[in-house]
Amino acid sequence: MAASITPREEVDAILTSIAPRKQPRQAITMLPPTEELDEKLLVVSFDGSARVKSSGGAFSAVVWSLPEWTVISAASKYKTDLT
């Protein structure tokens, strides 16, 4: 029975040749949105869940006006025909 030790430099060279190439992370530059003085901006948030066994589910929604974050409308309901 024979045994040998492969030098570390050779192991690194072999692993480099078979290792998947890593792509550098790409930085995405995105400018923040701007608001004109005459624009009316709204943010809508919705969350809900539907039940599979018994048709129906609950949901909530909120509408805000920007830039003050004033609540325009808010609702939370249960609907029997929600899927």
Image (tube, rainbow, N blue to C red):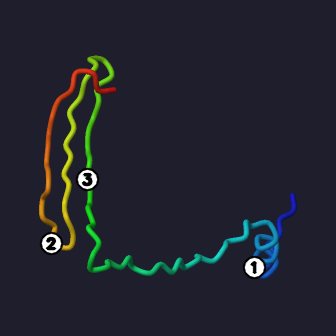
Q: What is the number of the mark on residue 8?
A: 1
> Residue drawn at (74%, 67%), measured in percent from left and top?
19
Q: Pinpoint residue 37: horizontal percent, then vertical percent.
A: 26, 80
Query: For the residue carrying disc 1, how many other residues have a C-alpha within 10 Å: few (<14), some (14-19), or many (20+)?
Result: few
**Left or right, 11 with reference to 22:** right
User: Residue 20 is drawn in which quadrant?
Assistant: bottom right
> Residue drawn at (26%, 60%), measured in percent from left and top?
43
Query: Badge 3 is on which residue?
Result: 45
Q: Which amino acid type is shown beneath numbered disc 3?
A: Ser
> Residue drawn at (81%, 77%), measured in percent from left and top?
13
Query: For the residue carrying disc 2, how many other residues have a C-alpha within 10 Å: few (<14), some (14-19), or many (20+)?
Result: few
Q: How many angstroms separate mark 3 from mark 2 (CA)?
A: 16 Å
User: Residue 10 is drawn in which quadrant?
Assistant: bottom right
- The answer to whether mark 2 and mark 1 are in CB contact below 8 A is no
Query: Badge 2 is on which residue?
Result: 68
User: Helix or strand or loop: what does disc 2 sit on?
Assistant: loop
User: Helix or strand or loop: what does disc 3 sit on?
Assistant: strand
- The answer to whether mark 1 and mark 3 are in CB contact below 8 A is no
Q: Pinpoint residue 4: horizontal percent, then vertical percent.
A: 83, 69
